[in-house]
Amino acid sequence: MKHSAVFYWLIGIAIAAVAISVSFYFDDAVWNFIQQHQNRGLYNFMRNVSRFGDWPSHVVLGLLLLGTAWIRGTRKWSRVFLAMLIALALAGVTGTVIKCVVPRPRPSVHTDIRWGGPRFSSKYHSFPSGHMGASTAFFGVLLIARRRVGVACFPIPILIGFSRMYIGAHYLSDVVCAAVLGFLCALLVGCLLLNAHQTSKH
C-alpha cells in the first residue's frame, strides 16, 4: 500500500509539473486567442460566472449544506462539508499570501512588466487565481470524499477558471497553478479530517 501511494504521488507531481510548464508556455497564445474571440453576450455571462464564483458564494453554499447535514444528523456529510469549507479557507489564505509575495500584473493591465509591481494592488494580484484556487479546493474535497458527486460538480471550477481568463483577470498559468494549489489544499484537509476519522473508526 505504501509503495502504491508513493507511486501515485509521483505520478500526480509529474502531471502537475507538466501542466504548470505547459500553461506558462501558452500564456500569451491563450490570452491573444481570447482577445480575438471576444463576444459581448459571452463576456457578460462570464462576468456573472466570475462574480458568483468567488469565495463568498462557496462559503454560503458550504454553510447551507453543512447546516442541512447537521439538522438531518448525517455526521458523515457534516464532516465532508466542514472539510470543504476548511480547504477553501486554506486555499484562500495561501493564495492571498502568494499574490502579495509574488505580484503579477493582470492581463488587462497595460504594462511592460510581466512580474513584480505594487504588492497590495489588486491589479497586480493575477498569480494565482483566487477564484480558481478556492473553488478547486472546495469541490476537490468532495471529489476525494465522494468521487461520483465530485466529478459531476467539477465542471463548476473549470467554468469559473475559464471565466476569469475570458474577462482578462488571469493568464492560463494563474488558473492552472491555482487549481494545483486548491487540489493540494483539498488533499491535505481530506487526509487530516476524512481519513483520520475513518482510521479512528477501525
Image (spheres, grey):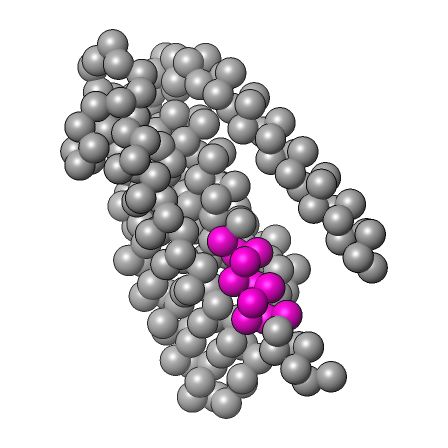
4 left or right, relative to 15: right
Could you say where residue 197 lies in the image, as x and y percent from the top left? 61, 78
187 in the magenta segment: yes
Q: Residue at x 54, y 85 (%)?
A: 74
List the single residue furthest toward the top. 112
In which quadrant is the C terminus drawn? bottom right
Q: In which quadrant of the rendered view does residue 132 lie?
A: top left
Q: Nearer the viewer, residue 142 or 104?
A: 104
Q: Nearer the viewer, residue 107 or 199?
A: 199
Could you say where residue 78 lies in the image, as x and y percent from the top left? 49, 78
Q: Residue at x 34, y 39 (%)?
A: 98
Q: In which quadrant of the rendered view does residue 106 lie?
A: top left
Q: Residue at x 67, y 33 (%)?
A: 14
Magenta-tinted stretch:
185-195
Q: Residue at x 62, y 60 (%)?
A: 144
Inspect this view and state whether residue 149 appears. no
Q: Is 140 drawn above or below residue 19 in the view shown? A: below
Q: Is 179 drawn above or below residue 59 in the view shown? A: above
Could you say where residue 109 lies in the image, as x and y percent from the top left? 21, 20
Q: Nearer the viewer, residue 9 or 148?
A: 9
Dominant secondary-structure state across the stretch colored magenta:
helix
